[in-house]
Structures are given as structure tokens and as C-alpha cells.
Image: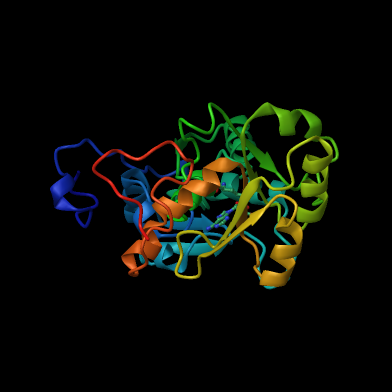
Amino acid sequence: MTDSHPSFPTRLAGHDWPELKPGWVWLCGAGPGDPGLLTLHALNALNQADVVIYDALVQQDILAWAPQARHIYAGKRGGKPSAKQRDISLQLVDLARAGHKVLRLKGGDPFVFGRGGEEAQTLVQHGVPVRIIPGISAGIGGLAYAGIPVTHRDVNQSVTFVTGHDQSGETPCSLDWQAIAKGSQVLVIYMGMKHAAQITASLLAAGRPADEPCAVVSSATTPDQKVLETTLGQMAADIEASGMEPPAILCVGRSVLMRQVLDWQGMMAGDAPRDLDPLGRGLPAEVSCPG
Ligand code: SAH
């Protein structure tokens, strides 16, 4: 902590927090929504920035922690066309060159389906110094808020993160769904709502079972979070029937079953765990199953 940003929590004194200097851009993940999932580096950045340029998925509460800064919206909302990626990157260059202390805030992790790599590359190409602050990605933290461990020893030794859109906004035909289906026991699909029917059909055609457990988690970690438990065969129809809206993560795999014992938000609201041993591994002797 330095004197230049005294509002940063004093309990964190003792660590040498970096200073956001004029002419720099810090490219920072804001996490999936819940402001409590910001990193301390993100908070340190919010304290110091004089410009925050943020995406659609960044919660307003988080921006409120940078009241001294100008807030510039660079995303898609309310049906307006999204700012062009190249324009955003060049705007960052201009802001840095104008001597601002620029915080580029993106949902989740900036390098996970967030085009953070492209922005950082453009900045470096233009000689603008950057710092990267990782964030909690929706495909990990969002599932955790739904009580779904993204890896679980009895289920998966690997996990695949997939995007359901390509650059044109269409399903990525270029993806080898056969290989993806066979590649790991758990698939975490970002931006998959629009093309859920095509994606699930491809996975079924590639041999994933129709009764495989799946979940859809929308607006994860926010007060609007919704969770749908379904199967691969039913997922597209169930999404349609549920009226769930993006942003949402689709999860395919048996780790979804763990929600029956790990739905901690449900338990906080008073629900009993549905099954203490959803994977049938056998309970410790001192535990008896509910009901
Ligand atoms: N960089 C982000 C991902 C950006 S792509 C990250 O690491 O999380 C945008 C996609 O992320 C959305 O279409 C959705 O699939 C997912 N996403 C982001 N925030 C989410 C949230 N709060 N709940 C569910 N999905 C979310």
C-alpha cells in the first residue's frame, strides 16, 4: 500500500501494491459478476484508474469502486451493435498515449474467450506498457456458485473449455466436435445458448450419451443466477422452455451430479442436500443418507 491510494484496505498494508502509472493500461478480469470475486489486484486498480473502459458483463457495483474515474462502456447491450474490437484496442492506445491511467475491465478472465490477448497484443505493438490481472472465469467460478466442481476426482481428469460462437457469431463449424466429445469427460461451453441445439446434436452424434447429466447456469454469481439441471438429450428443449437468457455456461458431464450434494446456495436458503453420495461412491460409516 502506498499513500497515493489510501482508500485501499489498510489491513492489506505490508504488501507492495503496484502503482498504475500514467500511460499504462492494466487489462483486468472482473470475475463472473459477484463483486466479492474480484481479485485484490483488481481492487487496487479500481482505486487508482482515471479511466475505466468496461464490457457488458461487468457489474455496475464494481464500477462504483472507481468513482474518481471516467467510465467508458465498450460492449454490446440493449441490442446496440458492439464496438468493433479494433476500435476498442485503438481507443486503449489513445487513452494511454494521452497519459491516462487506464483500467480495461473485462468479465471473468481477460484471456478466456475475452479477446484480452488481442487487446494486449495491440497495446504492445503500439509500445503501450501493460499489466495483466487475471480474473475468475465464469466457466470455473460460475459453476462453483452452482455447486458444480469443474473437476472432481471420480469424474474427470481433464476439462475442455469451448466457445459456442466463432468470430462471426455462428456456431464454430471449424471446431472438431468429434474430438471435443471424446477429449474430456467434462465440457464447459461458453456462449452456447444461441446454438445449444446444434451443439448438443453434434455431441450426441459424436457418441456422448443422451442421458448424460448437464447444467445451464445463467447470470452466475449474480442475484439473477439461475441453474437448470438437464441431460444432453433434453438440454436444448429445456433451455427453450425455461426462458433462460445469456450469459450462461453450459456444462456437460457427470460432475453436474455433484450439485445434489454441493448446492451450497440452496443449503444456505434452507434446502437439504438431495443426495449425500450422488456418484454412488459409498458413504463414510458415520453418515446416514437423508430420507
Ligand atoms: N472472459 C469471460 C468470458 C467472456 S465470453 C470469462 O472468463 O468468464 C462471454 C461468455 O462468458 C458468456 O456468453 C457466457 O457464456 C460466459 N459468462 C460470462 N459471465 C457469466 C455469468 N455471470 N454467468 C454465466 N455465464 C457467464
- Tell me which corner region of the image, top left, top right, bottom left or bottom right, holds residue 56: bottom right
The location of residue 247, given as percent across then percent down, is 61, 60
The location of residue 69, given as percent across then percent down, is 41, 62
Q: Is residue 78 left or right of residue 264?
A: right
Residue at 45 percent across and 69 percent down: it is: 223
Q: Is residue 185 visible?
A: yes
In the rendered image, which quarter contains the C terminus? Answer: bottom left
> Which of 172/11 is in front?
172
Examine the rendered structure and indicate whether residue 103 appears above or below residue 81.
Answer: above
The location of residue 225, given as percent across then percent down, is 50, 65
Examine the rendered structure and indicate whether residue 203 appears above or below residue 79.
Answer: above
The location of residue 4, given as percent across then percent down, is 23, 49
In the rendered image, which quarter contains the N terminus? Answer: top left
Examine the rendered structure and indicate whether residue 129 appears above or below residue 38.
Answer: above
Residue at 76 percent across and 63 percent down: it is: 237
> Which of 279/172 is in front?
279
